[in-house]
Amino acid sequence: MSIRWMASALVAASVAAVSSGQCDPGQLFPPSSPMYPVGSGPRSVAIGDFDGDGVPDLAATNDVSDSVSILIGSGDGTFDAQVSYAVGEYPRSLAIGDFDGDGAPDAAVTNLDGDSVSILIGVGDGTFGAQITYLVGSNPRSIAIGDLDGDGVPDLAVTNGNPDDSVSVLIGIGDGTFEDHVTSAAGGSPRCVAIADLDGDGVLDLAVANGVGLISILIGIGDGAFGAPVMYPGGFVPAFIAVGDFDGDGVPDLAAVTEFDSTVNVLIGIGDGTFNGPSSPLSPTGSGCVHSPSWSRISTAMVSRISPWRTPKAIPSVS
Ligand SMILES: [Ca+2]
Ligand SMILES: [Ca+2]
Ligand SMILES: [Ca+2]
Ligand SMILES: [Ca+2]
């Protein structure tokens, strides 16, 4: 049973319930909370001032209708009706940046089933040009924007899920186009990527939440390439990761939510690219043991998910 089929079935069931009188939308949402139709299967949302009037607007990915909905903000808390733009197959995440340097926000969208990224260049009046797509790895789920090679032009980092288990970097040219993607190993079933200078050398680095229960740190070299990932235990299927300075020492720290542990795992940055967290870094070679009291809370099932990482063909798919 495909995810797309299940999503369609849920939408159909909801519509049927409302139509049959079993469910009154007015009881679910008060009249003061307006709802705005978008496409089918909305998955993620981002904010940008797409028409340049100083009022935030919305962009949402719709994974069943393979589109992005743009809703222009009126300034009083309301939004115009959506205008949709076609993107690739099963769009998942999107990020907003100015890829062509014209001051108008553009959008980058991961297409989970299309193994691609769609770029929508903003005109500046709230409309967007037709998509330009770039191939990446398998099952791209998450996307982040940063100047990874230090040339002043925004670049993209994209997680590629199983079986590629990598991060794709697309270097921006500056005119809204991107070079072909270059991949770096990231762990097992990467699900979310965040960008920050984790070791304070002025070069942006990557933090990746991997579905097999690991947080990967990839230190940027400066030309858009990255060193080998250093792994930290991340709980049972870390799904999202965010960067912030939680202890106020000026060094970025990490917070990752786990899908099945019902926890947020916090890793405190040391400043050299390493972290104090649930445990010490794991050796990518698989040698040695991890000595940490918190390691014991990781279940046998969790260990079985980590151990196969040392023999990549055995990694369970959680994409
Ligand atoms: Ca632009
Ligand atoms: Ca760049
Ligand atoms: Ca760095
Ligand atoms: Ca800190």
Image: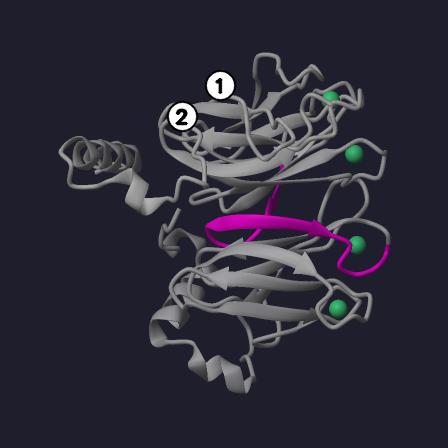
Q: In the picture shown, does residue 85 fall above or below 146? A: above
> Residue 48 is drawn in which quadrant?
top right
Q: Residues within 10 Å of mark 2 (few under 14, many from 20)?
A: some
- For the residues bearing labels 2 and 1, Cβ distance under 8 angstroms: yes
Identified at 45% across, 41% down, the residue is 33
Q: Which residue is mark 2?
A: 39
> Residue 274 is drawn in which quadrant?
bottom right
Q: List the single residue furthest toward the bottom.
A: 293
Q: Which residue is mark 1?
A: 84
Kind of residue sitting beneath label 2: Gly
Identified at 37% across, 44% down, the residue is 29
Identified at 74% across, 28% down, the residue is 98
Q: List the single residue furthest toward the top.
A: 130
Q: Residues within 10 Å of mark 1 (few under 14, many from 20)?
A: many
- 95 in magenta: no
**Helix, strand or loop at mark 2:** loop
- Disc with the residue nearer the chain's start (2 vs 1): 2
**Residue 123 spot, x, y in % from top left:** 69, 14
**Helix, strand or loop at mark 1:** strand
| Residue span colored magenta | 182-201
Which color scheme did the rendering employ for the protein?
A: one colour
In the image: residue 308, left or right of residue 192 = left
**Residue 194 spot, x, y in % from top left:** 64, 50
Q: In the picture shown, does residue 312 fall above or below 65? A: below
